[in-house]
Image (cartoon, rainbow, N blue to C red):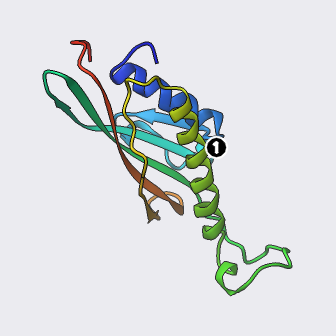
Amino acid sequence: MSDLGVYGINALLYDALTTEGFNKVTFGTNSEVDLSDQSIYPYAHLTLTSNKQTSQINTFTYGINILDLVDDNSNNPRESLNELSLISNVEDVFHDLSFKWNRAWQSIKKNVNDIVELPDEITLEPGYSVAQNRLAGYTISIEITIPNSGIC
């Protein structure tokens, strides 16, 4: 990552998430995103939640939401449907998003140099939304620490 700071971190996250099949990745406020547009899913939204600085390091904390559509399975011809998946594909959404995030995170870890500190463990917190579409996904909080070069 040649440009450390918000620009470089955003580019790194964007590249990894789009490579793993997220149709839209946004930064900042998602109030300008048409969440009813079904073509944007799976969707990732990045929010810079804090920047902790010392004379030696900058620690950027990001909140990342990854979401996908929940579909009705009532007409699904799959023979493998069980009681848990009769109503919707929410299991599929959580499963797929978990794997997409994991592959994206592994890619990020491979593409940063030794001076960037990334957490070994990340918690994905599941959530649901029914505001404009039926959505399920995860909220992820990560800290990325870089040397303080004076350029953020």
Most extreme residue toward the bottom is: 83
Viewer-closest of 28 and 103: 103
Q: Residue at x 44, y 41 (%)?
A: 45
Image quadrant in which the C terminus is located: top left
- Residue 138 in the image, given as x and y percentages of width and height: 46, 57
Residue at figure coordinates x 36%, y 33% from the top left: 117
Q: Is residue 137 above or below residue 36?
A: below
Q: Establish if 148 lies above or below 51.
A: above
* Near-viewer residue (143 or 140): 143
Residue 41 in sight: no
The kind of residue on which mark 1 rests is Ser
Q: Which residue is mark 1?
A: 39
Q: Position of residue 89 (x, y in %)?
A: 66, 69
Q: Is residue 80 left or right of residue 20?
A: right
**129 on left or right of 104:** left
Would residue 43 be seen by someone viewing this image from the given angle? Answer: yes
Q: Nearer the viewer, residue 132 or 57?
A: 57
